[in-house]
Image: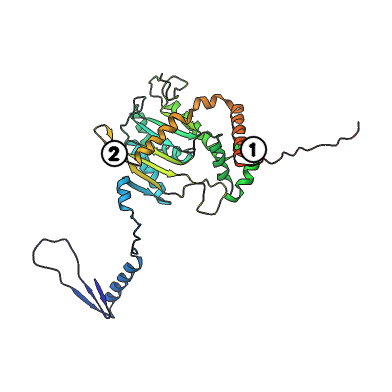
Amino acid sequence: MTSEPGKVLLEQYIYRGLGPSTLPVLEFASGGKSYDEIHSSVLAVWRYACPPLSKYDVGTAKGLAKADIRNIFAQGMDRTKLSQREIESIVNARKPRSRAGGPTVDVLAVSAKFYLRALLADRKLMEKFSTAPALVMRCALVNPVSQQAIMRAIADEVPPDEIPAALEGWSWDRHRDSSLYNDVHESMRHIDHFNHQHRNGQVHTGPEDGSESRSGGQDRIMLRLYSSAIARAMTRTSDAIFVEEYLYGRGREFKSGTPLGREVPIIEYRLRTEKGQNQQRNPQDILLATFGVIWDSYSIDAATYRSRGEKGEKLEFEKNLERLREELGVHPQPTLIAVGDQGNP
């Protein structure tokens, strides 16, 4: 297409054979509707065309291809499609296999509240668990009284500029009322209930994953609580890895009850398998190794956590809060004790 003063020349490009014939070049004179439409198209293309790249720019195509990214889920309707895509990927799960002998799905999250709610309500996924007794899910949630959980809970509850004051006045009662603490415990109860209903009948005696159930059967969802950095959420199936970065910042005005996150796009990486071997490429191999480190080294099994009881949980919280304040140079607010009349007897 060529736009000149008073006219536009338009030639159509199509796929064709190697014969000598060509399509005619059309000339539209100014003043007509066709001319105006075509001229507007030229201006729109010019307006939104990419400016010349810096000599230091590398673009995105090469990086996307090398990382083997399949989808980038943004906000809005993409989130709904994300849930359905994850469920689809889990329902179709196959190898690789866990040490317990079955194909696994790995989940790393803060509380996995929304994730578990969507999964456990999906009929196809429940049928998958019923018809594929070897399917096992490994779920790593944050230890709700760890230092990382305390910092995240505070950032969830108050605006950024109020975090220092909130840390000064944070307490066991306030933490126990936080969304993070309650969401983790709610997810633990959901997982317990699910495992109770979906025993696969296999007896697990190995000590390595700490997932032996109270009734002696292997849990279908193995649960551990990690105390390492809350850096990302991750779901690994047999053919994909879904990753969401966890950040303390907010892209919108603070609204009470709105958790951090859900604004950062979620990236789906392909995880290819060939002849039983994972054909992993960066960053897939790094992500898989990260989950392994957290699961094997930086977490405890849920049974150990529960054995501490509420008293032990409170003691661990207070120890972690004190250490966190010490590291950050934050002094707790003094506790005011009401004093009654000290009259003479």
Distance between mark 2 and mark 1 Cα atoms:
47 Å
Left or right: 103 in relation to 336: left
> Residue 41, position in %: x, y?
30, 70
Q: Quadrant of residue 329?
A: top right
Left or right: 8 in relation to 305: left
> Residue 174, position in %: x, y?
63, 39
Report if the CB atoms under discs 2 and 1 are less than 8 Å apart.
no
Foreground of the two, 345 or 85: 345
Whether 209 is drawn above or below 73: the answer is above
Q: Which mark is residue 21?
A: none
> Residue 307, position in %: x, y?
55, 24
Residue type marked 1: Ser
Query: Looking at the image, is mark 2 or mark 1 earlier in the sequence?
Result: 1
Foreground of the two, 196 or 317: 317
Residue that extends furthest to the left in the rendered view of this protein:
19
Residue receiving disc 1? 171
Residue receiving disc 2? 272
User: What is the count of numbered marks?
Assistant: 2
Foreground of the two, 138 or 333: 333
Q: Residue at x 48, y 35 (%)?
A: 141
Q: Residue at x 30, y 70 (%)?
A: 42
- Does dot 1 land on a helix, a strand or a loop? loop
Q: Quadrant of residue 278?
A: top left
Residue type marked 2: Arg
Q: Quadrant of residue 205?
A: top left
* Mark 2 crowd level (few <14, some 14–19, many ≥20, 10 Å Cα): some
